[in-house]
């Protein structure tokens, strides 16, 4: 039972530099999500397929980076890796001002992805080491709130700044915000090193089934982030980015008010609910012929996907030796980015051949497959908890 001392700011204060460092790094990443589709099409003359490729490139880099970053965080420490990632995000954010081709922009997105992968994975592993075992699902969920608050507010800020001041000021914003994150991370005391096992795996097996389940769900997110603005614009509807903004606010709100569910109700049950509600949102988007319908679809997707990551991450942590938590979380989270990468590219091809609405029909199928993956994990003999209590705050 939580008391006021355990649930108030005093409890969360040790985690705040990590939360805020992640938030400011993702402000810049969110701004690029809102701006790059228009920059690639209107300034660089790119196609729908190239828009999807540019958006997905950051995810491809993160897919490769996260497992390596997780292994490094287990071995060399969390803080130095998180600081390195923040510095890379700042460099990449400012460098968008200097690229003038789709290929160069794609390359820069890869660098941005390396930075994001280091920041997120090092911070997540740090938090798992600090959090009490009974509160890990909640803490992981709040970490996601920090990320999605940054992405959502960054996307909103990027769209507004682009309209009011142009692309150059957006890129300045993308460089400045990670530097603020870097300074906040510096405030957190260096954690004690924890010895890892000599034969720890780079890709722990406990991460794979939850990871594939997460990847199937994240493909829908890629479709929303990459094409909802263009989908609405193709029907003569302005401000389609609002569907993505509402997704972010719903995502954050669910984590804030329902983030205790995975710990209290069980991660498998909550993950199943999450996948089904995401599928409902995608079904609404298939038929979205107005901005309110698109917003409703984004809202349902945000409510659904919000608790999927912490639920599945909790399953991974419970099934992994503590000496491999970094590698396991890095591998698991890389599946989110793998799904975004595949989903972004696939969405571009679908849009170019069948139209934007069919993107969401295809992603509806992947969301339902994600629900089936959760059901499969719930079969007898699939759960083998090995993780002992936390090492302490």
Image: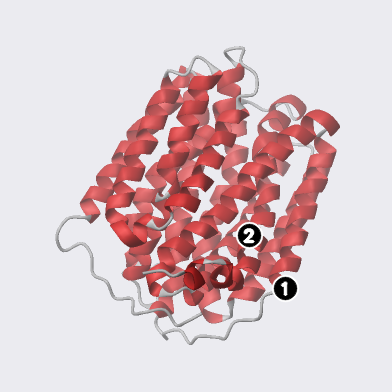
Q: Nearer the viewer, residue 37 or 9?
A: 9
Q: Position of residue 197 (x, y in %)?
A: 41, 85
Q: Which mark is residue 22?
A: 2
Q: Residue furthest left?
A: 380
In the image, residue 13 sits, relative to residue 151, either above or below, namely below
Q: Is residue 48 visible?
A: no
Pick the residue in front: 142 or 52. Answer: 142
Dot 1 surroundings within 10 Å: few (below 14), some, or many (20 or more)?
some
Scheme of colours in the image: secondary structure
Residue at disc 2, secondary structure: helix
Q: Measured from the top left, where is residue 56 in percent x and y?
A: 56, 42
The image shows residue 278, relative to residue 89, as above or below, that is: above
Q: Residue at the location (51% across, 24% down)?
A: 294
Question: Where, by quadrant of the figure, is residue 117 drawn?
Answer: bottom right
Q: Residue at x 78, y 52 (%)?
A: 175
Q: Position of residue 3 (x, y in %)?
A: 44, 70
Dot 2 or dot 1, earlier in sequence: 2
According to the picture, the residue beneath numbered tag 1 turns out to be 186
Indicate left or right for 260 with 294 as reference. Answer: left
Q: Position of residue 6 (x, y in %)?
A: 48, 72
* Mark carried by residue 109: none
Q: Quick check: can you spot residue 216? A: yes
Instruction: Please name the residue shown 47% across and 73% down the image.
Output: 131
- Taking the spot 43% from the left edge, 75% from the top edge, the residue there is 132
């Amino acid at each position: 039972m939580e008391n006021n001392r355990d649930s108030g700011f005093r409890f969360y204060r040790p985690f705040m530099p990590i939360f805020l460092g992640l938030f400011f790094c993702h402000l810049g990443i969110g701004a690029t999500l809102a701006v790059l589709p228009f920059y690639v099409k209107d300034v660089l003359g790119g196609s729908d397929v190239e828009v999807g490729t540019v958006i997905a490139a950051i995810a491809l880099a993160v897919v490769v980076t996260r497992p390596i970053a997780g292994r490094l965080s287990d071995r060399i420490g969390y803080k130095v890796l998180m600081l390195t990632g923040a510095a890379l995000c700042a460099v990449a954010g400012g460098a968008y001002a200097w690229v003038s081709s789709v290929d160069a922009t794609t390359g820069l997105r890869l660098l941005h992805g390396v930075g994001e992968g280091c920041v997120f994975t090092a911070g997540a592993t740090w938090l798992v080491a600090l959090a009490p075992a009974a509160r890990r699902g909640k803490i992981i969920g709040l970490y996601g709130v920090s990320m999605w608050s940054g992405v959502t507010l960054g996307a909103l800020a990027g769209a507004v700044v682009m309209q009011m001041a142009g692309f150059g000021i957006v890129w300045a914003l993308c460089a400045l915000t990670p530097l603020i994150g870097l300074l906040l991370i510096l405030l957190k005391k260096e954690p004690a090193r924890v010895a890892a096992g000599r034969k720890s795996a780079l890709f722990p097996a406990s991460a794979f089934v939850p990871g594939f389940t997460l990847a199937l769900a994240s493909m829908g997110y890629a479709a929303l982030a990459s094409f909802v603005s263009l989908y609405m614009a193709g029907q003569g509807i302005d401000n389609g980015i609002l569907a993505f903004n509402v997704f972010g606010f719903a995502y954050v709100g669910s984590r804030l008010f329902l983030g205790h569910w995975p710990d209290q109700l069980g991660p498998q049950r909550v993950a199943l609910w999450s996948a089904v509600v995401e599928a409902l949102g995608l079904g609404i988007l298939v038929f979205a012929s107005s901005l309110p319908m698109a917003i409703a679809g984004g809202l349902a997707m945000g409510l659904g996907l919000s608790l999927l990551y912490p639920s599945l991450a909790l399953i991974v942590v419970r099934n992994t030796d503590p000496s491999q938590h970094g590698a396991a979380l890095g591998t698991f989270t890389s599946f989110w980015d793998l799904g975004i990468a595949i989903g972004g590219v696939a969405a571009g091809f679908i849009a170019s051949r069948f139209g934007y609405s069919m993107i969401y029909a295809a992603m509806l199928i992947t969301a339902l497959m994600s629900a089936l993956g959760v059901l499969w994990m719930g079969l007898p003999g699939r759960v083998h908890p090995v993780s002992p209590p936390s090492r302490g705050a």
